[in-house]
Image: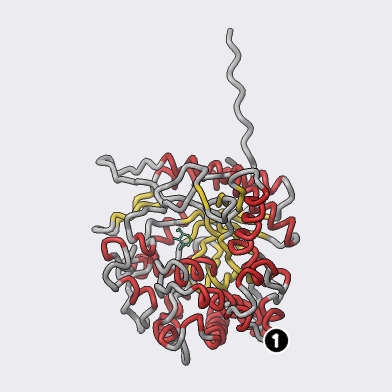
Amino acid sequence: MSMPAPQPTPLRFPPHFGWGAATSAYQIEGAVKEDGRGESIWDTFSRTPGRTRNGDTGDVAADHYHRYREDLDLMRDLGLHSYRFSIAWPRIQPDGTGAPNQRGLDFYRRLVDGLHERGIAPMATLFHWDLPQALQDAGGWEARDTAHRFADYAEIVFRALGDRVPVWLTINEPKTVVQNGYLSGHHAPGRQDPDAAYLVAHHLHLAHGLAVRALRSTGVDGRIGPAFNLHPCYPADDSPDAAAATRLHDGYENRLYLDPVFTGHYPEDVLADLGPGSRLARGVVEGDLAIISSPVDLLAVQYYTPIYVTADGGTVRRRPTSEARWQQIHPEGMYDILTRVTRDYGPVPITVTENGLPTRDTLRPDGTVDDLGRIAFLREHLTAAHRAIAAGVPLESYHVWSLLDNFEWAEGYDQRWGLVYVDYPTQRRIPKRSAHWYRGVIADNAL
Ligand code: IFM
């Protein structure tokens, strides 16, 4: 008689581990002209010919503004514990300053109430790239004043929703604003100006720090932290030059964001590389770094891809790429970045607020979407996250990017990142096979 094959032991997550999914306002809401919303830089950018694939815009997106109740039910059916979404600044202050637009606040109040009714904890990001166009016209993130306007906006939101939102994230991926908005220019506002880019980084950090202080000064109870997309950097070969180039690359990719917030200093190697006359160096006013390093309650990490750096400072691909050309699939990078952050910056609680990939999803005639590649990706990354927890990383929750297919910025609607398929012509939602799989992971608290 043959013995049954041994069953693999399930990887159990800690009790109370938070299982979530994430979205952002411009990528799903649509309704860009409703209830007093002002224009954002993404309205302007996406309507500019040639800026997005197929000329796609977020005008309708996944129509979440009208369908949020249905989406809340989807989240409940998945068993989510936590939903990370963003608040559209132009819905709250149409021109980025002044009195709040009550109808904008009311939408988010309905959303967070709906989450609580379904037993899901809201996690709100204050800025996910949709800067009010009026503030861009006044200089955007190159203007120091924008950081102060952000703190005013944050205070309005804390006062309006602070009783219902336990976790706040300040600025989503400042690095993407710097690199895509001001270096490559393929995101709004579409600039290619390296000197401006790093001044923008400083003002984004300042905005973060001012918002942390605003939360504390309102007396609202929530926890708050930054949301950084971190990329583990590896040398592409064994040469000392590749090691040195990797170190500097890591400065630009990771330490430029982590150091000011967690140590109160910009990394010396990056400052030296930018030079003493850089607008970043000249833009730092005494006291800024104390504001920027105001103590936070948690760090949100978004992990998608590693970077391999060559001896001449270039980058190469070493891993299979996804439908997003910039994404190399390397689950170990999740372990490396989580353990590194804990090692280098101390035991700050961590939440993974984004992790996922786009796949070529199609709706089959039988009404299903079979995204096996996404399941494999999530399983492998969660396995790496589990190992990081076992190694001592205080990881408290994990959010898949994304709950729904959505507007993927310059890529428009071509890339599908959701657990739930959106049939854009009808706006019908169809949970993909990965959604069913994720529901099981959540129910078992195990892989
Ligand atoms: O869709 C984006 C999101 O807005 C920010 N992080 C990366 C995702 C995938 O590119």
Which quarter shows the C terminus? top right
Q: Which residue is at 33% across, 77% downward?
A: 44
Q: Position of residue 180 (x, y in %)?
A: 45, 67
User: Residue 36 appears at what percent x and percent y?
Assistant: 35, 84
Q: Secondary structure at mark 1?
A: loop
Above or below, 321 relative to 206: above
Judge the density around disc 1: few (<14), some (14-19), many (≥20) Cα neighbours within 10 Å: few
Residue 178 seen by the camera: yes
What kind of residue is marked 1?
A: Glu
Residue 11 quadrant: top right
Where, quadrant-wise, is the N terminus in this rendering?
Answer: top right
Quadrant for residue 215, please give it. bottom right
* Residue nearest the observer in this picture, 72 or 406: 406
The location of residue 67, given as percent across then percent down, is: 35, 65
Which residue extends farthest top? Answer: 1
Q: Position of residue 13 (x, y in %)?
A: 64, 46
On whether ligand 1 comes within 8 Å of the CB at mark 1, the answer is no
Q: Image point 33% across, 43% down: which residue?
A: 368
Residue marked by disc 1:
286
- The answer to whether one can see residue 113 in this image is no
Total numbered badges shown on the rendered structure: 1
The residue drawn where x is 60% and y is 26% is: 7
Left or right side of 422 for 232: right
Q: How is the image coloured?
A: secondary structure
Choose between 434 and 195: the one closer to the eye: 195
- Farthest residue to the bottom: give it: 98
Residue in the image at 60% along x and 72% along y: 274
Of 162 and 49, nearer the camera is 49
Q: Is residue 382 above or below residue 23?
A: above
